[in-house]
Structures are given as C-alpha cells and as structure tokens.
Amino acid sequence: MPGPLAGVVGAVKSALKGGDKTEPSAAEERRVYVFKKGSSAGRKEMKALLGGKGANLCEMAHLGLNVPPGFTITTKVCQAFYEAGGKLPAGVWEDVLAAVKEVEEAYGAKFADPADPLLFSVRSGAAVSMPGMMDTVLNLGLNDEVVEGLAKKRGERFAFDCYRRLLDMFGDVVLGIEHEKFEEHIHAVKEENGLKLDVELTGPHLREVVRRFKGVYEKEGKSLPHDPYEQMRLAVSAVFGSWNTTRAVKYREINRIRGLLGTAVNVQSMVYGNLNDNSGTGVCFTRNPATGEKKLYGEYLQNAQGEDVVAGIRTPKDVSHMAENFAQAYEDLVYNTTLLEKHMRDMQDCEFTVQDGVLFMLQTRNGKRTGPAALQVAVDMESEGMVSKSEAVLMVEPRHLDQLLHPMFEGTGKAEYKSAVLGKGLPASPGAAVGRIVFTADEAEKWHAEGEKVILLRVETSPEDVGGMHAAEGILTARGGMTSHAAVVARGWGKPCVCGLDVLEVDYTAKTATLKGSVLREGDWLSLNGSTGEVLQGKQPVKAPELSGKLAVFMEWVDSFRKIGVYTNADTPADAAIARKNGAQGIGLVRTEHMFFATAERIAAVRRMIAAEELMEESTGAAAEALAALKEFQREDFEGIFTAMDGLPVTIRLLDPPLHEFLPHEGTAELDALCDTLAKEMSGRSGQHMSAAKAILEAAVNVSKKGVKPFPHIMVPLVGFEEELSHQIKVIRKAAEDVFKAAGSSVEYKVGTMIEVPRGALRAGDLANHAEFFSFGTNDLTQMTCGFSRDDAEAKFLPLYVREGILPADPFEELDTSGVGELIKIAVQRGRETRPGLHLGICGEHGGDPKSIEFVSTLVDYVSCSPLRVPIARLAAAQAAIKAGMKDGGFSKSQD
Amino acid sequence: MPGPLAGVVGAVKSALKGGDKTEPSAAEERRVYVFKKGSSAGRKEMKALLGGKGANLCEMAHLGLNVPPGFTITTKVCQAFYEAGGKLPAGVWEDVLAAVKEVEEAYGAKFADPADPLLFSVRSGAAVSMPGMMDTVLNLGLNDEVVEGLAKKRGERFAFDCYRRLLDMFGDVVLGIEHEKFEEHIHAVKEENGLKLDVELTGPHLREVVRRFKGVYEKEGKSLPHDPYEQMRLAVSAVFGSWNTTRAVKYREINRIRGLLGTAVNVQSMVYGNLNDNSGTGVCFTRNPATGEKKLYGEYLQNAQGEDVVAGIRTPKDVSHMAENFAQAYEDLVYNTTLLEKHMRDMQDCEFTVQDGVLFMLQTRNGKRTGPAALQVAVDMESEGMVSKSEAVLMVEPRHLDQLLHPMFEGTGKAEYKSAVLGKGLPASPGAAVGRIVFTADEAEKWHAEGEKVILLRVETSPEDVGGMHAAEGILTARGGMTSHAAVVARGWGKPCVCGLDVLEVDYTAKTATLKGSVLREGDWLSLNGSTGEVLQGKQPVKAPELSGKLAVFMEWVDSFRKIGVYTNADTPADAAIARKNGAQGIGLVRTEHMFFATAERIAAVRRMIAAEELMEESTGAAAEALAALKEFQREDFEGIFTAMDGLPVTIRLLDPPLHEFLPHEGTAELDALCDTLAKEMSGRSGQHMSAAKAILEAAVNVSKKGVKPFPHIMVPLVGFEEELSHQIKVIRKAAEDVFKAAGSSVEYKVGTMIEVPRGALRAGDLANHAEFFSFGTNDLTQMTCGFSRDDAEAKFLPLYVREGILPADPFEELDTSGVGELIKIAVQRGRETRPGLHLGICGEHGGDPKSIEFVSTLVDYVSCSPLRVPIARLAAAQAAIKAGMKDGGFSKSQD
C-alpha cells in the first residue's frame, strides 16, 4: 500500500519544472504503461496512445499524487485486437503479467492472494471522453476462495459486497448476462428481509445475494472463471470489444468523434470507498461546470464505490460537506485539484476515493462545461494569469458560443413567467427547452423524425438512451444528481436538462407523470429552464440572447486574433441588422430570388408577370408592369440592406434562371415552380440580370444621396465558362452605365462570380480576367464535385458512409477538404495568378462550420454565414489564426 | 487583257521549285493582296487571312496560271469591319484604290471606262468553304453611261445582259430588294415576246428588262449608285455583312465551323462566259467526287456566267464534251487541273470561264467528296506516289468512313429491289435513304423534330433550305446537276441525294408530285438510292456495310499508325461480335444493368425478386431464388461475351444502386424504376457487387474450361472516395476467392474503377492505390464538372451557348478539353504517379468522337465506343498519332 500524501508536494513541484514529455518515439513505445505514485513512463500528452484516462493517470502518478498503482494497455493494442479478429495480439499478455508484478510490488500485496488480496478494476478509456459509453469491471480477482480471505481481513459484508458487484459486472460486461437479471435478486433479498437500501444489507444478506447471483450464472450456463488471471484476460478483451458496441458507435457518430484507433484499457488496483463509513467516493470539478464559478464543485457518497455516484441511483452529498466526514482527505483534495488545474491549465473534472480516511485520485480530465461556464472560466483564468489571451480564446469551443447564443426564456423568475412553474429540480444543463413530453428514447427519436419538438421525461437515463436524448429539446429526470448520466451527456451537448426532480412520479405504462398533483401526459407541452432547474407548464416564450458583458470582452479578444473577415448571408434588412449586431463585416450573399417570395404581394406580382405572356418584349404590357413592380420591391429591399450595412460590402447574387434546378432546394415547391416559370418567361438570363443589376444600383445611388455609403458587389452565379461570365458582366456594366447616367450620380461597385461548378474552379484563371471577386458556393460545389444531391445523399447513404468511415464527415456539414477543398485551392491559386488582388470568400453553409473555417482560413479573405452564426465564425476564425500562429511560433503558448 | 496560256508552263514549274510561302509575319501583313498572272504576295497557306478562294487565287496567279487579275481584302478587315460597327476600317479604302490601279494595269483597261470598261466581281470567301452561303455581285462598274460604251464594244445584247444581272444582284445583295421582284419582270418580257429561254432574249429585250428593273428600284425608293467606286464600296461592305446573315450562321452551326475571323472579299476583274458562243463557264473536279474515279468530272454551259451553273437552273453539258466547243481551252483545262492536283496534293474542285476561246481559272479548292470517293482517292493517290500512306490516312475524314459504314439497300439493281423503281435521276450523293415525303424545308425540320424520317422533295434547293436538308434522310430534286446546290451540300454531309429527276412534276400548293403517272403525296414513304440515282416507292429494306476490299487495306494502314487501342461498349454477345468484326480490341464497357432488362423473362425475375420482401437475408426465400435466376441469366450473357471476345479484355461495370439517379437516363422509365427498387431491395451495394462479381467470374471460369481465354476487368462505378473503392474491391476479391475455390480453377482478372465523379478525378492518386485500371465515364464527368444535366442542357440552352460562342461545342458531343479534359489530365497524372502501369481508357460517348479522341490520344491507352463507330475511332486515333508525329517530325510529310 502506498503511503499518505505527506512529502508529495516537493516531488510534484520538481516534476512541474521538468519538460513535458510528448508522444514517445516508436523505439521507446510500449504496449503496456505502468503507473504508480511518483513514477510512470506515460504522460498527459500521450492521449492518442493511452486514452485520456490512462494518460492522466500516468501524469498524476508522475506528479507524485496518490494514485492506486496500475497500468494502461494502449489503443494500438486495441487496433491490433480488431485486426486479429477480436483476439489479444501476441506478446501483450506477457507484458500484462509483468505489469501486474510491478503493481503488486508497489501496492505491497499480491493479486488475488487470499491472505491479503490485491484486486483490480478494468476500465475503458479512449483519447476522447465518452461518458458511460464503454464498459467497466470492478473487483477483479475475487473467487469463492479469495472472497473468504478478504472477508477475514476486511469483514464479511465488505467482501461479499465486492463479490456480488464483480459477479454482476463480469456477467454483464464479459458474459452478456443482463444486469436486470441480477438486480431482481437483490430486490428480492431486500424485500424478504424488509430492507429498503443496499447499505442495510448485512454480510449474510450479501452472501445470500452472491449465492443467488451464481444461480443466475448457472441458469445461463455460464461461470465466473476461478483463475483471477483468466478473469483479467476476459475482462480486458471485453473492454476492447466494447469499443464497437452499437451504443458506443452511435455516441461517436452523434459527437463526431472520429479517427481514433480504439480504446485503451486501464487496469488499476482497487481501493475501496465502500470499505467502511470512514470511506467514500466522489467526483468534483475545480470550477462550476454550469456557471464557471471558481469554487470546488462536486458530490460524494459515503461508504460507496464510484459506480454508485455516476449511475445517479443514490443522491449524493455536496462536496463542500466532505470536511465533516473526511477532514484530511478533503484538505488533500483541495490541494490536489488546485495543483492539477494549474498544471493542466484548464478546469479539471476529477474522480477520487477515500479509503479509511486516505484520499486516492482515480482520474482527472479537462471538465466538460456549458457555454456560460466555458466563457467564465476562460475570462477568469486569463485574469488569474493562468492562461494567455490566445489560450483563453482556444478554451471556448464554437459550440459553447452556440449555447450562449441560444434563446433563453423571457423573464428571469416565477413572477415573470407566463406559464405556471410546476416544480424545481437540479439545474443540470442550462438553457431553455420547450417541447412535447415523451417517455422513452425511442419515442423521442420517432417524434423528432416527424418534426416534433420533444422533452424526454425519464426516471433516470442510461447509455442506451443517447439517441433519444439527442433528439430531444431538453431532458427531465426524477432521479440523479448534477453528475448523473443525463446531466453529463446533456451538458456535453449544450442541451437543457433538469435532473433529480424527486417529487416527479413516473408511470411508463400509462405514459403519465404526476408532479405535485398535476398530471403530465404524453404529448403535453412542457418547458424546462436548465439554468434554474424550473419546470414550466405549457409553452413559455423565449427571447434571443445578446452579445454583452464578458462575452463582448471575450469577442474583442477573438477579433484581435482573427485574420479573415466574417460576413453574413442575409436576404432582408432585418437579417442584415441582426448580423451586423453580431459583428458581421459585410454581406457575403443576398439571394435575390428570395426577395420575390417574401410577401404575398410580391408573389402576386410574380404571378401577374407569369400570366402575362408578352414578356418576351419586356417594354410592353402587363408583364412589364409586373416586372416593374417586382423591381420596385427589390430596390426597396436593397435600399434597406445597404442602409443596414452602411459602409460595408453587400454581395448580391443574381437569379440564375436556366440552371436553377441545380440550386439547392432552399424553398418550397412553389418557389421552385415559380423560379422555373420565371426562368422560362423572363427574357433570358441577360434580361433578368440587366433588370436586377439596375434595381441594385438604383438602390445604391438612392441611399448614397441620403449619406449612406453602399458597396454593392454584384455576383453572377453558376458560371462554368469564361464567355458566360464576360457576357453577363458586360450586361451588368451596361446597366450601371445607364443607371448612373440617369441618376447623374454614381457609386463604387464590384462585379464577380460565384464559384460553385467544378469547371468554374478549374478555369478560375480565365474567370478572374473578368471577376473582381470570387465567392465559393460550397453547397453546390460539394454536390457536383462528389456527385451526389444533398437531399438524396443525406437521406440515403451519407450516414452509412460516415459510420463506415468511407467519409470522414457529412461533406455538406464539414467541408470535404481533400476533394472540394482541393478544387478551392486550385481556384484560389489560379484566380490570384491572373488577378493578384482578387477578393475571395466562402458563402456556402460551410462558412459557419468551425472545421471548414479552419481549412479555408489560409485561402480566402472572409467567410460568410447565417446571422446567428456570425459570432461562432468569428471565434472559429480566431482559433484557426491562433493555431496557425502556434505552428509558426507567432503566439505565446503560455504565460507560466 | 492578259495573254493566252502559252508560255505559262515554265513559270509554273519555277514557282513549284520555290519554297512554300507560309503565314506572313505581322510586319509584312497587308490588308489587301493583289493577284495577277505570275505574281502575288498571297499563298495557299494563308487561308485564315485570305479565305480559301483568295489564297488559292493568289497561289494560281503565283503559279502563272491564267487568272483574271484582282485582289483579296483580308478576313482581318472583316473582323475590324464588325468591331467598327459595320464600317470599313480607316485606310482600307485607300488600299483598295491602289489595288484597282494595279489590276487596271495588268488587265490593260480602266475600271468603268465607257470606252473599254473593266468590270469587277465581288465575292465572299472564308477560310472554310460555305457553298452558296454568302453573297456575290457580278459586273460591278456598269451604269447607264458605261453600259452604252460596253454595248458599243461587245454588242447590245451582251452589255444589257450584264447590266440586268448587276441590277438584280446589287439590288438583292446590297439594297435588300428581293430577287423575285426582278425575276417576274424577266418572265413578263419573255412571255410578252413569246420566248422560253433567257438566251433567246435579244439586245432590245434586255434593254427593256433593264428599264423595268430600274422601275423596281424606283418603286423601292432605291437606286444603283452611278459612281462605280461607290458601287464597289457598298458591295464590299455588303459581302462583309453577309458573314452574319441567319443562313450563314445556321450553316456554320450545322457544319461546326467555328473560330473564323470572318470572310475575305475577293474583287476580281470580270471575264465573260456570256460574251458569245465561243465563251462559256464551268466547274470541274479532277476526280469523280462521288466515286473517286480518276477522270476529269464536271459540267459547263456555253454562253453563260458562272452563277447559271451553280444555281442549277439550266442543265449543263458534261465537261467531256468541252473539246467539241473549245478545243484549246479544254486542253489548257486538263493541263491546269492536273498541275493543280499535283501541286495541291489533293483532288481539286475548279471553276473556270472561257472568254472568246481563252481559258481563265476562277477558283480552285480541295474538292468535297463522298465517303467512297474519299477512300478511292486516298488509296489511288498513294499508289500513284502522289501522297504518302500517312497523308492518305489523313485524306479520309472520320465522317467519310461514317458514310461508308452507313447501311445500303439490299440488292444492287432493279430486279432485286422489293419496291418499284419509279424513276432515275442523277446519283448526286451516294447511300440509301428511306423516309416520308415533305415538300418544304420547314416541314422537314418540323417532322424531323417530331421523330419522323423524311425525304425532302424540291424542284431545286436554295441556301435558305439548308436546315430542312440537314433534317432530311435524303434529298430529291427535279432540277439541277451534279454540282447544283442540293448535290454539293448533300455530298458535304454524306446525305443521299438524287438530283435533276426532270420527269418529276411538283405542285407545292397541292403538296403532290407526279412521277411518270405515279402521284406522290406528302407523308408517302419513298426510298432514294443516292449511289445509282434510283427513286423507289415505299420502304426498301437496307443492309449493313462491310469492311472489305480497299477499305480493309486502308484500315490496315490506319492501324499501322494508330498508337492507342480501340475498344467497344457492348452489352450483348451479338454486339460484341459486330464490334470485333469492326476491329474492336476489347470491351471498354459492359453495362450490367442492361442485362436485367434484355428480355421479358428477365424483367419477370426482377419483379419476382422485388415482390419477395425477405431479400435482406439473401440466402432464403423467393427473393433469393429470383436473384439466383438473374445471376444465371447474367452468367450466360457473360459467357457469350467472353467467347465473342476470346483473348481480349472485357470491362464490366457493376450496377451501382445507391447512386443510380446520377446515371445517364439510358433506358425507359421502367428501367429507372426497377433499378431504384432493385437498389433499395438488394442487400446494399456490397451484396449486389458480390453477386455480380460472382456471375462474371463463374462465367469466366466456365468458358476457360472450354478453351476460351477470358480477361474480365471488373469496374466499380461512381467512386469519389478511396474507402468506397477499397471496400468494394475487397468484396470483389472475396467473390473471386470463393468462385475459384468452388471451381477448383481460376482466371486472370483485374479490378478497377470508372472515373466519372470530379472528386474521383481529383483523388485519382488515392484511387490508384486500389484500382488496376481507370475508365473515364466522360458523360457523367461532363455533367458534374460543367454543372448541368445533359437532357436539360441540350433541350434548353446548349444550342444557344454554342451559337453565341460561350461554348465551343456541345460538351456532350465533343469533349470539353479545357474543363473536363483538365480533370482527365489531373487524374491521369495522379493515377500514374501512384501506379505507373495503370491501364487507362475512355468509355463515354466521347470515345467515338474524332476531336475527343485526338485530345485523349496522348493521355490514355484506349478509347471505347459503340460497335459501329469502332472503325471511325480507329481512323481518328491514327490521324491523331500522325498529326502528333508531324509535330515531332516523326512522319514524312510528303513523298514528292
């Protein structure tokens, strides 16, 4: 057994002075890494190889923290395990045996020695945290003989409690016997003995539970191997096998976790939170993961093993009470967590066990947090001098900002709500959620697929529920604390969650829940305030968020690092104004065709025009009148947009009739049909472009007379051929000449093209002879380059392709950098060769996707995205610049 | 006036010794090139600048032939004319005046000198011949004063005949007065005087005609300028203006004539075939343009101007009778034409005039010819030592071969026809045509658009009829000879034509024609034998042509030069056999989906399979049975194809269910629907590929046991991503393993992919890690690269784009070399970088298009096309190799 914490501090400090250890070279790379207090060959930087849990266990050991000794089997072994068809590769087992020896020495006891048994836990641990997604076996090494030895040393109750847990987990994880089959026997024994809680079970009770559990094995025709090493071999294999269970695969899919080799396996000596009342187990965050408040935040359970906390079955105590039960352990915990946060330079999420008053650190990792918390932590850590401004900017993920920009409920307290507050649970994940109640994950997925917004209401959630949780607007549970499965998963996704509303009584069969007398039925509307824990009847109105306070400060930092512009896609003056408030520096895309369908009045004008057949002669008849009315509407819109974007560029895409059917289906079938007719009826592309260009430039001249500075950038779409573009540009320049002459006044304007046809990208050098700017329409460019229609692909095979690793991601969400990106590179290079000052941007949906922004950030001058994503794009652009600068050594990596 | 032919020969010989003059440098380039017997700065190689007619006039003058002196205004002036908005550019007129002076000196008379007037013709002449498409004015320089002088010198009849022609042509071409308005007065004068023929008109008659023609001018408010130079200025401008008339534009469109600057204008001193009966005019070919026979072939008219011959109004005499009328002139003609053919190294098409017994050469050019003639001339000229084998191969155009491969009527004479022979006209353009009678060009176009096959029946054709002529299967005219408009145009297109069937009486109003008592009505079926001149009632059966005799010899030459392979696209054993007969060296594309729909029995099996829902488990139930039946059908087909292609590679494209909607719509809606259901119902792409691969390889093993050598190349379609391909290739290799194991025998096979998605081309380096061959599916690749669907584009805007010069050609007919071709280049380079031995081919429709073949001939190993186009592809590939070799100096350019 390792000694107490005393004397550790010096060792930690000296470790901190030493250089960071990075990925090992192939020569020194091992298959198994041992960790024990004060020593390990592993380091926190080796997460790809050791998984997050393993790498940090090694790091803590290296720092001298009190870590139960153990070892990590690498992710490369996992990969080799699958390549070998699900078998441990040759040589690994010998390494494991050697590691066990080393651990035995450090621990001061022998594996499964009946006299003083050392037991092991076996846990998964990938490079990216997947809470509850993979499998764990505790108390490995017990058998009928060893358990009696343990009983002799630690008492019958403790020994048989451990044994029944091993039987349950080993049965479930390794042998595939359902957990429920064990659960029912424990209930039976409690009932027969008139007991309510597990802790009331005595040694003899648990001995009886073990007997019945063995009956379950027998009934299933299975058995727990008597040989502890055989137990270990099977458990290690099972954990490797858990990497590819349906739920693990689904979790990775939802969370876009890709490119990992597999999971590592952590085999660690057991310490016992369930040894006695001077023992316990807990989890804590170094800061509040919901708000970012700088205060140790966590929960613990006395006389319990770790799984009891995470599963949310018993309601734990707040970590602030821990000193009352374990004074020294609490002091050590505060010291350790402070040290770890400073060393890791980020908020930590730790697991610990107290055994007979002594604190053991079981795990540490960067804590998942909500958007508000991420922002608070980043700003605080910068002002504490713990991180530099650039590091602070990197600490807030784009999805965090997304949460901050999500709508919130109107009003801030009960008095101001429009709906009745039915109850208050734990504020497990902040934000406002409004939806209709469903009681199962399956229903949640089904209703969601039908377009319904749902609230998933459960007694508690389990890893099998992730699909439904993801489909829901928000999650409400009756049981479980702030670190329960539901809370952890919801926070990870930024999805509102209220937990532990224990007055809620759920009847799954009747599909109803009762909350202080109110009956909630399937399909009823419910609103959740994840920031306060309040549950509200019906649909509570929501409001848009604002960029103010510390968020405004943070965005200033962001903009100080950002090297490319962020524009917005907006079709109306209102959208333009929102985008500008969000920091848009211009409009990258106004879709003129949307203007025709903005109001009933306009649609009527379009119909009038179509009805009038003499349109081919534009200057006469009803069609010309209708066209004039439309032009008038357009000009009004343009005036509004120019005014909203005073002093900033506004890029306007002209309607492209002949090729419209290759445009993404952005609107209704009616829009399609009208566009089509419009295309046929209007006097060809040139006539339409002439008309639209005039509307744009007249609007620009008009507002400029009122003191507004308009910068129209007129964009010709769907161009594949140089002559096509030069022809259209001539038409536009002629329109400009006419307008300026008639107005006796002119404005600055640019003419360019959208690059959205592969040929346009390939011939960019030709197009740049005429275009003053390019805007990459990456939606269409992706369709044509990859050869699939978006609607069809996303419905039919893209999810399958992504799951099978054929595609790294849905190329409509995340830019296909090696295919479409290659074309963009070609176009940028060829375009700039012809015209060095060519202005370049991205206006597809990828303009709002952080990974896509990172890719294009060295290629283009700006990205353009929807008004609400502008702040996210600003952050992504800043992070891309910081990362690029780090590679170049341009930004300081730390201030330590 | 120039002297007679005597003494010319020496000059010609010395000119032939001199080096060829090529394009002038910019410094020495002129706007106007004078030509006169024995001297010119122009040469035959300067066609782009001088037009074909002008360049050859200069060449003939330079050779010392008796050419009426004149000058050529260049095509660059035409371009400048349009750039100046339809005005002669500055300085040109001064050059013209200087040239007129030079011509006056050479001719020995003054322009429009009443005492001895020199008159001029003004004619168009582009770099590519456009027969009858552009305008001509003759006898320029006459006015009321000059005509009297001319009458004094040459007689009243002659002078006023010239004058009435000038008034008619100048009115029509320059002033826009319809020709018919003059025509009716000439008819009236003949009628009033009881005359039938123009030649019967006397001097006074023609004086009256001129009076009435001037009345027409007056009525139109127009007049012939009195100043001869003003006449010339207006005529030159009108000829430049004729370059862009509707009919000229349409002719260029149909004949794919592109990239010309404009037309040159040839101003030439008049010589008079209508001077007296010792004068005449004619056209002749140095060999028979229909058969290739080596014998002077042509026609002439006594006492007539050239336009009378070409217009086909009077039926001319055969050139073999010319010696009877003009002995010396005929001797000179034979000498000149023989010399010209040898000098030009190709069959010549000459125009000449005899004036008072003296021969003048008015024009020479390489003669248009039919496919059979092209072949005969090439083979003959090679054996005469006039051209090398490589030059002979270049003399036969792919479209000539196309004609040779067109169907002919079954039977070779009246006795063997199944239909009645109604009459026999001139065999103006060979081949068999069967269609329904229409009487106007407009109807021909209309019926053709509705899918009808039509025969255009006209008294004679005019340039306005070219659209309808092109739409017709064949052309039948009552008037006009072998060199009439109808004959020349039809031969150019290889379209069967029977001319001068003078017993045919046409009633346009009633839409009937009478032929020796038979009444032919609109819509009646008619068959034309353009090789014999026979006109047959109803639908005469046709037969396929064969590659034999001199064609077989010629194809041997072709193959000796060819550097890439020619494969075929074939889905059945029968098609494979035809292709092999035509010289296919393998199959580049078998489309497996076509096999499912070849017979009713198979379609039934497909339906059974779809009906059976348990297909997901492939091994059980009715679906599996139906699938097995289909596999059986497929295997039979594959066995047949392997046997037909014994020893040659057979490339089989697997069905691609998930992405089928991007396949070209090759079949019926039912095929689409079934493919779709098939795709959904079959157990995914892998299951289908496994099944198809097994059918292919089982078939290969089966035939190999019978001594056949199969080389299956299995091709995965629509691949954009490396993993997609590697996954499918694993499936195929697994299928092969299974089949070979079960059969106890194996065959060689390759696995590759179709490059048809732009991303596939860009990532070719990755794909080549797995693919042993690439085949470019240029149809789909064009759709996706250019961003338009073929059906839609060809229906809606491609013709417009081509006409406006936005696209050089329909990219689905002729490979878009700078866009799609660029992607092919990228793919070839990246693919071969990864795998140097990568086997490369083209299997889109471009594989049969000569220009596309020329482009890819340095990039790929083979092209693949439809069975009937194989010989054409062989020729195109050989010509590409010869042209490339000429650039490298690898082939001898001549044997002279």
Image (cartoon, coloured by chain):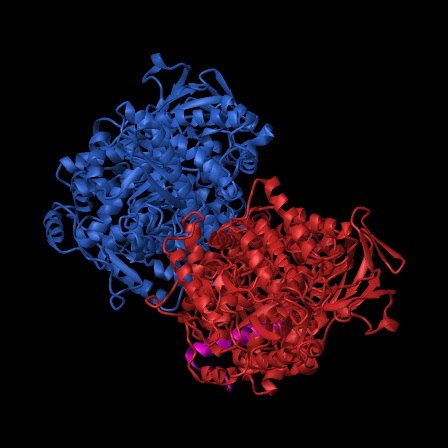
Chain colours: A blue, B red
Relative placement, left or right, of A272 versus B587 is left
Q: Is residue A826 visible?
A: yes
Q: Is residue A618 magenta?
A: no
User: Which residue is the extreme one toward the right?
Assistant: B517
Relative placement, left or right, of A845 versus B529 is left
Relative placement, left or right, of B149 versus A586 is right
- Estimate the x, y position of residue A150 in percent, counting from the top left: 33, 49
Q: Quadrant of residue A676?
A: top right
Q: Is residue B33 above or below residue A253?
A: below
Q: Is residue B886 magenta?
A: yes
User: Which residue is the extreme one toward the top?
Assistant: A415
- Estimate the x, y position of residue B290 in percent, counting from the top left: 69, 73
- Estimate the x, y position of residue B167 in percent, counting from the top left: 59, 52
Q: Quadrant of residue A483?
A: top left
Q: Which residues are magenta?
A: B872-896
Q: Is residue A202 above or below residue A34?
A: above
- Estimate the x, y position of residue B568 in percent, counting from the top left: 62, 70
Residue at 19%, 37% in the rendered image:
A557
Judged by its main secondary structure, the magenta piece is helix
Relative placement, left or right, of B402 versus A628 is right
Q: Is residue B405 above or below residue B203?
A: below
Q: Is residue B721 visible?
A: no
Q: In this rendered view, identify the residue nearer to me: B334 or B164.
A: B164
Q: In this rendered view, identify the residue nearer to me: B288 or B350.
A: B350
Q: Is residue A218 above or below residue B714?
A: above
Q: In this rendered view, identify the residue nearer to me: A670 or A855.
A: A670
